[in-house]
Image (cartoon, helix red, strand yellow):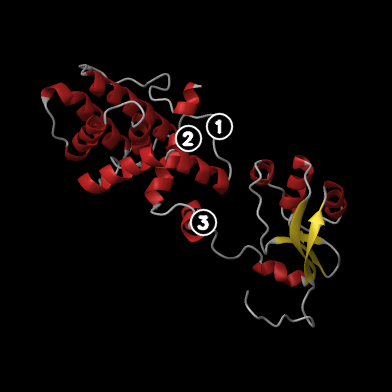
Amino acid sequence: MLQLEFLTEGVPPIGYVLVTPELAEEWLKLNTHNRPLKKSLVAKYVADIENGCWHITHQGIAFDENGRLVDGQHRLYAIIVADVSIVMAVTDGVKSEAQLAFDDGGGRTAHDAFVLSGALPGVTRRHVQICRSMVFERSVKRPKTKTQLLEWLQKHWQAVDFTVSTVDDIGKRNGITQATVMAVIARGWYHVPLDKLRRFYEILYTGLCEPSEAVVIKLRDRILESQGNRATSQRATRLTIHRLTESALRAFVEGRTVTYLRHAKNELFPLPEEKE
């Protein structure tokens, strides 16, 4: 512990309080001067609370010099929804003009949090991007918080890290190396021989193949064509590429010749928990 001399005069008092659902309701009655509530943020906090992943930090609840709640409304709503008491830092008497500085710093990404916490040695932004796409494109149970995303990445680390290593070994190319495509390779780790997966990516990267592997070139062409298509939303484009990649990988593994590459209607490479 650092030997610090804390100021007590001229600064708002700060302390830690066990905030019960009942106390949260009372404090929210003072929520008359705040930004609009974001239900998605409340849901993220609730998920962490219900999964036992809520951490005590220096951030919490703040009231201004007029007794109005000026920070922490989402945390308070989450306590009510989860119906759980949480210890939080509480500051009283913040000057009203101090709101100009609230949340004015750079937000920490999931990758920032994983690296700084030391929770997952060797993690890169590509690991996180692939992990998100593995869940985002198909799965219905998507991680809502950084803690849930970390748990999910730890669970599937071998599959994701194999995919990142393959890209690092063979090379990167715009479009081809997008997380949506790499997510299918990571899912394929559970189903396809690893040398087949590496060969699949090698063809995507180089554009060179044997006649029997031409389905991968069809996919490559579709991916590169989609890069200049601004007529559809990014979400729709990603989902299309994800499903085409699954179809191409399945045909490649089975050694099938494909005249026209079609979307996979169902998940072709389910994760172990999705099989259940």
Residue at the location (80% across, 73% down)?
Answer: 13
Q: Quadrant of residue 248?
A: top left
Residue at the location (23% across, 30% down)?
Answer: 196
Q: Nearer the viewer, residue 161 or 40?
A: 161
Can you give x and y, in whole percent of width and height, for residue 67 in the image? 86, 65
Residue that sits furthest to the front in the current view: 1
Q: Are marks 2 and 1 in contact (CB under 8 Å)?
A: yes
**Distance of mark 2 from mark 1, alpha carbons?**
8 Å
Residue 269 visible: yes
Q: Nearer the viewer, residue 7 or 71?
A: 7
| Residue under numbered circle 1 | 141
> Is 8 on the left or on the right of 121, as rendered?
right
| Residue under numbered circle 2 | 135
Q: Are marks 1 and 3 in contact (CB under 8 Å)?
A: no
Can you give x and y, in whole percent of width and height, for residue 102 in the image? 66, 65
- Please tell me whether residue 22 is drawn above or below residue 231 in the rendered image: below
Q: Quadrant of residue 206?
A: top left
- Please tell me whether residue 237 is drawn above or below residue 33 in the rendered image: above
Sequence-first disc among 3 and 2? 3
Give the number of marks.
3
Label 3: element kind? helix
| Residue under numbered circle 3 | 113
> Is 264 on the left or on the right of 71, as rendered?
left
Residue 233 visible: no
Please state, as top left, top right, bottom left or bottom right, where the N terminus lies in the image.
bottom right
Give the class, few, some or many, for how many residues have Cα within 10 Å of label 2's Cα (few <14, many ≥20).
some
Residue that sits furthest to the left in the current view: 210
Q: Amino acid at mark 1?
A: Lys
